[in-house]
Image (tube, rainbow, N blue to C red):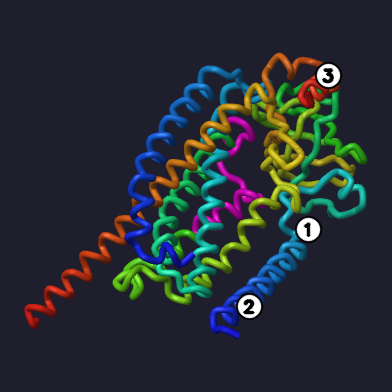
Amino acid sequence: MHAYANPTRFLAIARPLTPWLLGVGLLLLLIGAWAGLTQVPGDYKQGETARILYVHVPSAWLGMGGWTALAITGLVQLVWRHPLAGIAARAVAVPGMLFTALCLATGSIWGKPTWGTWWEWDGRMTSMLVLLFLYAGFIALTSGDEGQRQGGSLSRGAAIYALVGAINIPIINRSVVWWNSLHQGPSITLGGSSIDNALLWPLGLTLLGFSFLFGAIVLMRMRRIIADNRVAARLRRLADDEGI
Amino acid sequence: MKAKHQRLILALVALVGVAGAGVLAASALRDEAAYFRTPVEIQDGKATVGEAMRLGGMVAAGSIKRQSDGLTIRFVATDGKASVPVEYMGIVPDLFGEESGMVADGRMRADGTFVADRILAKHDERYMPPQMGEMPKGVAKAQQKT
């Protein structure tokens, strides 16, 4: 794992990978959006509003996946002190929060015509809102801290916060099973999907498309942090040479 | 033992501890965090008359009756084991209908009727094209499986 501790080695892979992820992701998203909006029928009961699921479901998946990644980087930071762990965590937090917000917004827009309300404090919605606040806390905790000025590593507090916050992820996932809720139960489980195949396939495209896009954003943000580190290091050297 | 192994074990033990605490808290909240109560819970006496609560269940087939004032509806909410008559005056969401889920805010009246102040429609986890929704449920289910 420490083979990629050297940013140069990491950049050798990240640089060519970024445009590929971005390009393929956008292409899949375009096809998925076109298919989801024009090629498949609406739902038998909800009609056209069901189509929001092609954005809502990938957003929920990435919001939760983002925090799972934060928890892993927190563990890697605490145990192995890997130099890329903190950089990755800082890069993931903002798009993770963005997709969580997108999930809440699309869910609310869907909830009004379907349930008859924008917002209710049921288990699923409340735990997802908690995830949004957890992201805000992590970003506040890691913005402008000591680590940001020195290579991007996470402080012990931030790493522990990322790990502890991960408890919310299984709670979000199980919230509709443990507690009766306004939000429906899981449609897609290991046992199969209760979304008919005629409506399901564009979801695969947008899910992959958003995921690739997320990956591209994370790589771009990681590269920027590494570039900032290099500039800072060079300025320090320059100042030393000048004897300031 | 190397320092990083110590840290790994420490982190994993802490993680298991915190996860355990989370599961305990979640199971303790089982009843409190429930968004609504079901008809069978009301039958078992888990609701007192006049207490503000939510009732969730399926609207029984053929049970929606509009009252003579033209505004009030009465229907039966059921969970398959028990059923509760519901009375509501107001506008229901578009997706409210017989044989589909609903959640009502309101309170129990002494005569065993649930008086709702507000009704929400609950959607289930099935999504399918309109042609399949019109088929009898068994056929649509069988087709879904193929």
**Residue A56 placement, left or right of A149:** right
Q: Quadrant of residue A188?
A: top right
Name the amino acid, label 2: Ile
Which residue sits at x=64%, y=71%? B15
First reached walking from the N terminus: tag 2 or tag 3: 2
Queried whether the magenta region covers residue A209, the answer comes back as no
Q: Which mark is residue B9?
A: 2
Q: CA distance from mark 3 to mark 1?
A: 36 Å
Q: Magenta stretch?
A: A112-133
Q: Quadrant of residue A43?
A: top right
Q: Residue at x 76, y 15 (%)?
A: B134
Measure the alpha-carbon separation of dots 2 and 3.
Answer: 54 Å
Residue type for callout 3: Val
Q: Which residue is mark 3?
A: B139
Precedes in sequence: disc 2 or disc 1: 2
User: Within 10 angstroms of label 3, few (less than 14), some, or many (20 or more) residues?
Assistant: few
Q: Which mark is residue B31?
A: 1
Badge number at residue A229: none
